[in-house]
Image (cartoon, helix red, strand yellow):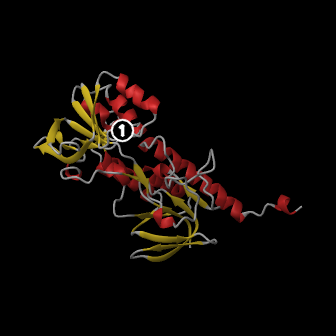
Amino acid sequence: MYKSVIIGTGPAGLTAAIYLARANLKPLIIEGPEPGGQLTTTTEVENFPGFPEGIMGPDLMANMRKQAERFGAEFRTGWVNSVDMSQRPFKIQVEGQGELVAETIIISTGASARYLGIPGEKENVGRGVSTCATCDGFFFRGKKIVVVGGGDSAMEEANFLTRFATNVDLVHRRDEMRASKIMQDRARENEKITFALNRTPVEVVAGPLGVTGLKVRNNETSQEEVISADGIFVAIGHTPNTKFLGGQVETDDHGYIVVKPGTTETSVPGVFACGDVQDTKYRQAITAAGSGCQAALDCEKYLEGAMVHDWSQSL
């Protein structure tokens, strides 16, 4: 029986682990096939406080893990197949580990950025291919950039990237974009943004030093061309990693866990959510870490309440 099991080891899960371990609650952290989350695929992180010279994403996650282990957190590797939240204690089925039992659960499984699935894309993540303008835009000062997508996120990222880039080509596979009118208008009014509509990305072109362009196919003529670029930002959305929960906690229409405003409490008492799995807006390492702290404090308070009967409710 564990007092708390944390599912996921990104900035949110590891911060929660640090706080719970320091509270002597001896949390168990289950890390999946990608320990550390999306930051392990990031090269230099320059916007996490406390590192004036920046730090490599994998190094930041390794440091957080060591800090949690220092205070007594336990780690196990395995894929969580299912969770039974019908009653406490909760039962967690972990591939290769069997059944684990917990009084509380903190879900910090994150959200996976959607990729195009074309040749040269995954191989060049960190070498010019990115899914986060806020994280990586600074590295493309004075460069040419391609943004792929047609929604509000793509418009927002394209506008943001013009702070650094000399030009931003916005590529979308349809001739009409699904972004709201106000976001489209802002992008069209930006002199640095050009549009390549009705074009389907077919390959990321790269050289020894990284990305050099994006090959696209004109959907009307079937002709292919290469749009030269130093960076390619894929802005086609994220998928929250909540499928394994089987609909036992409330989620929004996109699958993100809904938490009680101002807390990390989910619709199931004793189950908390932090990080990108419940964040549809910010999706930054520092905000994930902050929500991990909140989840740990909410969890600790819940456990204290479960051990002390509130007699006022019986009067």
Residue 157 makes an appearance in the image = yes
Q: Position of residue 257 (x, y in %)?
A: 54, 54
169 relative position to 23: left or right: left
Q: Position of residue 86 (x, y in %)?
A: 62, 71
- Front residue of this view, candidates 180 and 280: 180
Residue placed farthest to the bottom in the image? 98
The amino acid beneath tag 1 is: Glu
**Does residue 273 sit above or below 201 in this rendering?**
below
Seen at 14% across and 44% down, the residue is: 206
The residue to which callout 1 is attached is 176
For the C terminus, the quadrant is bottom right
Which quadrant of the structure image shows residue 85? bottom right
Which quadrant of the structure image shows residue 198? top left
| Dot 1: element | loop
**Does residue 56 sit above or below 157 in this rendering?**
below
167 relative position to 92: left or right: left
- Front residue of this view, candidates 191 and 165: 191
For the N terminus, the quadrant is bottom right
Q: Position of residue 128 (x, y in %)?
A: 22, 41
Q: Position of residue 195 (x, y in %)?
A: 28, 32
- Front residue of this view, candidates 271 and 115: 115
Seen at 47% across and 46% down, the residue is: 288
Q: Local crowd at mark 1 within 10 Å, few (<14), some, or many (≥20)?
A: few
